[in-house]
Amino acid sequence: MLFNSMQFLVFFPIVVLVYFLVPVKIKHIWLLMASYYFYMCWNAEYACLLLTSTVVTYAAVMLMERIRSRKADTKGKKQEKLVFVCSLAVNLGMLFYFKYTNFALSLFSGLSKLFSVQWKIPEFDILLPVGISFYIFQSLGYMVDVYRGEEEPEKNFFRYALFVSFFPQLVAGPIERSKNLLRQLAEPKRFDYVRVREGLLLMLWGFFLKMVIADRCAVLVNTVYENDMAYHGYQVIVANVLFAFQIYCDFMGYSQIARGSAQVLGCNLMENFRQPYLSRSIKEFWRRWHISLSSWFRDYLYIPLGGSRCGKAVRYRNLMITFLASGLWHGAGLSFIAWGGVHGLYQIVEEAVSPFFARFYERHCIDTEKFSWNILRTIRTFVLADIAWVFFRADSCRQALRILKNSLELSNTGMLLNDGLYQLGLSHREMSILAAGLAVLAVYGLLRESGQNVMNWLSGQNIIFRYVAYWTAIVLITFSLNITGQEFIYFQF
């Protein structure tokens, strides 16, 4: 069930209405049923995998807790570790089978050909379950926290099952931590007008980002990427820049709808984005982009590998492993791994050269806190991130390199002064709506960056301004129905 579908617009009000009418003791049961129905709307068989991951991690945590309470000696710790490893293997095994089997077989086939070995590699018709990477990582994060002794196990199976399957963030995050979401689910909220209103406004903003901006960017981006050999220079550059905004608005739009719908139901999900394109370094970019995933990899992979508490060589290795794993998490393809590797390389180079530039700035009395200097750093970071996005969007590394090469052929400068842009799939009206949407996004980002709570700022305006803003967004979303209906990009991960 897509958020941007009529089915969801019927489903969500029913869930909310019943949730606030049923007794407190069974609110979590109702949300659990609604969440499984929401997930089964894609494919009823998907629910079996979701339930399997839930049962395995719940049973493992309960067994570890039982071992811990009875045997505090070395033998008990070994048994507890064995249970943990087995549960980890089952969950990662499911993820590998459904997401990476054919990719691994294709790599093996390619390596075999290099050594002139003929193998008949079978191909499996495996359908990737929606959101499997998200809910498995959320389950594993909870299990690791309990294993480390950082969290108490949730003994109520139905409440834990709801934590794993909570429909607002089930298929594309944010990847929540048990210390945040589980505790909120244990304390159901009653109806609160202000909270519901703010949640609905968050949802409206998410629909605006997705349907008004991201889906229009997608039309132009798809035109270029699906026939990349026909486009060069500024056409490719415009497509690459718009893809940066497409994936940002698409994913942040989902996150805002998820946060808003959860807030209506009394839960506050973590913020997943903080104006990443205003970052002044790639390191800062990753503190602002897909925060739930980047913090997950930091806490459960980078730090256990040794983090930054070791020598430079090992620290750089840890960074590269983490970013390669992040790339692989996003998709079973070499282009995704290359995207992660490029970001890992960015961070290594950035860290390696920063002492040299610090001395250079000091020697030449360059004030790096000046506004103009920060603008240059922001532009540099955006350009670097945008180059990496080419590998993320391309179907292969070969296509990514071809697109980057084509973007350097700047022989069509006049395209920006004539109707060249309107040959890429969007009419004059659609381009005007897209430009207006991007302007609104820029204002939103600058307000947030200045420390403003946009919802509070909007609530502080007079009623005419507020309702003009609300209805303008609704009208623009309605006008977007003819080009929308696309799945959110992160559903495929």
Image: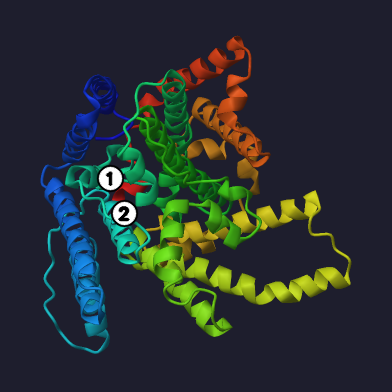
Q: Is residue 371 left or right of residue 143?
A: right
Q: Which residue is mark 2?
A: 138
Q: Is residue 408 visible?
A: no
- Within 10 Å of disc 1 (Cα), the crowding (few <14, some 14-19, many 20+) is many
| Residue pictured at 20% horizontal, 40% vertical | 39
Please tell me which of labels 2 and 1 falls first in the chain. 2
Q: Position of residue 490 (x, y in %)?
A: 35, 48
Seen from the viewer's position, the closer of residues 369 and 438 is: 369
The three-letter code of the residue at mark 2 reads Gln
Image location (x, y in percent) of residue 394: 40, 58
Q: Give coordinates of residue 226: x percent, y percent.
A: 38, 50
Q: Secondary structure at mark 1?
A: helix
Whether residue 34 sits left or right of residue 335 in the image: it is left
Q: Looking at the picture, does residue 153 appear above or below residue 351?
A: above
Compared to 151, does 217 lie above or below?
Answer: above
Residue positioned 15% across, 48% down in the render: 46
Is 489 above or below relative to 9? below
Q: Please name the amino acid that badge 1 sits on.
A: Phe
Quadrant of res 299: bottom left
Residue 253: x percent and y percent?
Answer: 44, 37
Tag 2 near tag 1, CB within 8 Å: yes
Residue sitting nearer the eye, 68 or 53: 68
Q: How is the image coloured?
A: rainbow
* Residue 366 visible in this rendered orientation of the protein: yes
Residue 163, disc: 1
Q: Residues within 10 Å of mark 2 (few under 14, many from 20)?
A: many
